[in-house]
Amino acid sequence: MPLFVVQHKHAAETCPAGHPEMGPMLLKHIAHENAARTGVNILSDAVVD
């Protein structure tokens, strides 16, 4: 079974997560339910330091 770890990087000043409309949209985009529609099973999430 393939296992993938994804780390997304960008400058803090361009981070859309801090935007009041984009933050919730991003969380919905990476939600377990949304991933399942494409056959992706998210087993866990983490913060990469």
Image: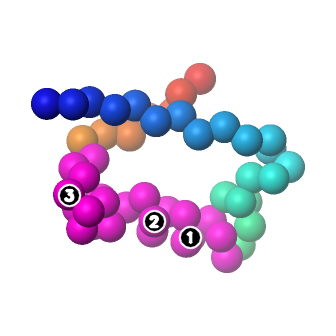
Q: Quadrant of the N terminus?
A: top left
According to the picture, the residue beneath numbered tag 2 turns out to be 29
Given this view, does label 1 or label 2 mark the residue nearer the observer?
A: 2
Given this view, does label 2 or label 3 mark the residue nearer the observer?
A: 3
Between the C-alphas of marks 1 and 2, the distance is: 9 Å
Q: Nearer the viewer, residue 46 or 11?
A: 11
* Image spot of residue 21 (x, y percent): 67, 76
Question: Secondary structure under badge 3?
Answer: loop
* Image spot of residue 39 (x, y percent): 20, 57
According to the picture, the residue beneath numbered tag 1 turns out to be 24
Q: What residue span does the magenta drawing correspond to?
A: 21-42
Q: Hey, what amino acid is under mark 3?
A: Gly
2 or 3: tag closer to the N-terminus: 2
Task: Using the image, determine if residue 18 lies above or below residue 43.
Answer: below
Question: Secondary structure under badge 1?
Answer: helix
* Image spot of residue 8 (x, y percent): 59, 40
1 or 2: tag closer to the N-terminus: 1
Q: Hey, what amino acid is under mark 2?
A: His
Q: Residue at x 38, y 40 (%)?
A: 45
Given this view, does label 1 or label 3 mark the residue nearer the observer?
A: 3
Crowding near pointer 2: few (<14 within 10 Å), some, many (20+)?
A: few
Q: Hey, what amino acid is under mark 1?
A: Pro
Direction top: furthest residue = 49
Q: Is residue 13 left or right of residue 1?
A: right
Q: Residue at x 53, y 34 (%)?
A: 7
Between the C-alphas of marks 1 and 3, the distance is: 22 Å
Image quadrant in which you'd find residue 16: bottom right
* Image spot of residue 29 (x, y percent): 45, 65
Task: Using the image, determine if residue 25 lies above or below residue 38.
Answer: below
1 or 3: tag closer to the N-terminus: 1
Q: CB of mark 1 within 8 Å of CB of mark 2?
A: no
According to the picture, the residue beneath numbered tag 3 turns out to be 39
